[in-house]
Amino acid sequence: MNKKILMDVIGILLIALVVVVGYKLSPLLLPKADLTVQPDQACDLHRGPCQVALPGGGKLEVRMNPLPIPMVKPFQVEVRIDGLSVSRVEVDFAGVDMNMGLNRPQLVASAPGLYAAEATLPVCITGRMDWQATVLVESGSQRIAIPFRFASAPHG
């Protein structure tokens, strides 16, 4: 009888451990934000830079180079921010309909208001794929998310 109780307690503790670890790791997998700003849906990162007005009068521009955005080859990601004091900038690349793993480079300040990093998107074996590039900006104690959608062409 005592052995069964001990096994039940161990099982409950293991379940609690999994829940706590999942809760602690969830910010890594799902970008959390205090505020989400929706960009113009007509903007296509494959064709050129996209801009969005930030709360408080600032603006953000994101640019990829080269265009169109290549698959399985490194490309440059640049984010220019005007009118907002920033402590951290990341871009979270996520497959819209398919989990492609964690791909969130942290951008480094290369000039005042300009942040850059190199990124690589994995190829999708099914051909065309919809992506969401969410720019995550930390300013003070606030985290702002700006999601941009684009589609990759089949790898050839």
Image: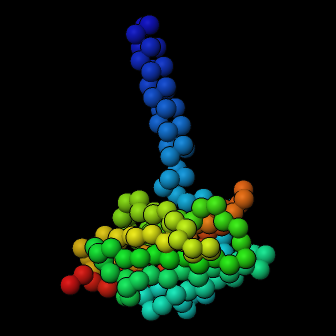
Q: Hey, which residue is sitting farthest right in the picture?
A: 56
Q: Hey, which residue is sitting farthest left in the picture?
A: 156
Residue 138 locus on image (x, y percent): 64, 62
Could one spot residue 38 in this view of the protein?
Answer: no
Q: Nearer the viewer, residue 95 or 80?
A: 80
Compared across the picture, whether 112 is left or right of 107 comes to right
The correct choice, above or below, for 1 with respect to 94 in the image is above
Quadrant of the image containing the C terminus: bottom left
Q: Hey, which residue is sitting farthest front in the picture?
A: 111
Residue drawn at x 44%, y 14% as measured from the top left? 6
Compared across the picture, whether 4 is left or right of 86 comes to left
Residue drawn at x 50%, y 82% as measured from the top left? 63
The correct choice, above or below, for 152 with respect to 16 in the image is below
Residue 90 locus on image (x, y percent): 53, 65
Quadrant of the image containing the N terminus: top left
Q: Quadrant of residue 140?
A: bottom right
Q: Nearer the viewer, residue 20 or 107?
A: 107
Q: Nearer the viewer, residue 150 or 69?
A: 69
Q: Nearer the viewer, residue 105 or 152?
A: 105
Residue 65 locus on image (x, y percent): 41, 83
